[in-house]
Amino acid sequence: MQLLRESEQENLGKQDYHNLNPIYRFATDYCNISDLPFYFKTDSGNFETAIVFNAENGAYRRPHPFEKWDDVRYPLVMICPDICSFESKIIIEFEEETGNQKSGAHYAKKGHGHEGDEPTKKDDIRNECYKKAGFELLQIWESRFKKSSIWKIVVTEFLINCWRKNLNDSMTAWKDIPDIE
């Protein structure tokens, strides 16, 4: 039930970095300018964003310093989100698209077909782990990222909505504090 082996993850992280850096930079700069309390890490192939999830109950933790990818066994699943704010439970995933399949061609090892396609089994497991653990997920599709800067609007709206949700949760928690008088 492993998603990717350690060597595959290293290669994919390095491949993604040129796409992730503008998204990471924009999200970080926007949070600094607008005083949103989100601090992101980006996966550059060195497991900076690695999280070990329990696929059955939604529990999660950071991997131990010397824990190897192959040591993690189901129901535990290690996932490296592309961009992550652990404290705020926010994840941004850059979704690569494979393009059109030609007759006789094989699908790329990495990629998702096109935006709106059914998610792969690996994506289902990943997204379910995020959901069970209470992480907010934004998926930025490669075709939108390459064609225009609409992704900046999507990232901005996502971050504002996450902030509002965190604020609302805080307000709800505040109402539940008993009056000591």
Image: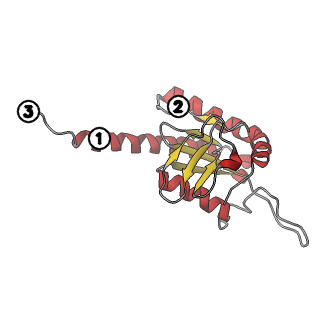
Q: Secondary structure at mark 1?
A: helix
User: Gap between marks 1 and 3, in whole Å?
Assistant: 20 Å
**Which residue type carries mark 3?**
Glu
Q: Is residue 38 above or below residue 150?
A: above
Of residues 79 and 67, the one nearer the viewer is 67
Q: Earlier in the sequence, mark 1 or mark 3?
A: 1
Q: Find disc 2 in the rendering and name its residue.
A: 31
Q: Are marks 2 and 1 in contact (CB under 8 Å)?
A: no
Q: Position of residue 128 (x, y in %)?
A: 55, 59
Which mark is in front, 2 or 1?
1
Left or right of 96? Residue 167 is: left
Residue 113 is situated, as x and y percent measured from the top left of the image, at 74, 63
Disc marking residue 181: 3
SS assignment at label 2: helix
Q: Are marks 1 and 3 in contact (CB under 8 Å)?
A: no
Q: Residue at x 51, y 47 (%)?
A: 60
Amino acid at circle 1:
Met
Which callout, 3 or 2, points at the residue further toward the start of the chain? 2
Q: Indicate the position of residue 31 as horizontal and vertical percent values.
A: 52, 31
Q: Nearer the viewer, residue 148 or 44?
A: 44
Residue at the extreme right of the image, as rendered = 104
* Pointer 1 residue: 171
Task: Calculate the distance from the C-alpha at mark 3 to the C-alpha at mark 2.
Answer: 39 Å
Dot 2 crowding, Cα within 10 Å, few <14, some 14–19, many 20+: some
Query: Which residue is more in the foreground, 137 or 148?
Result: 137
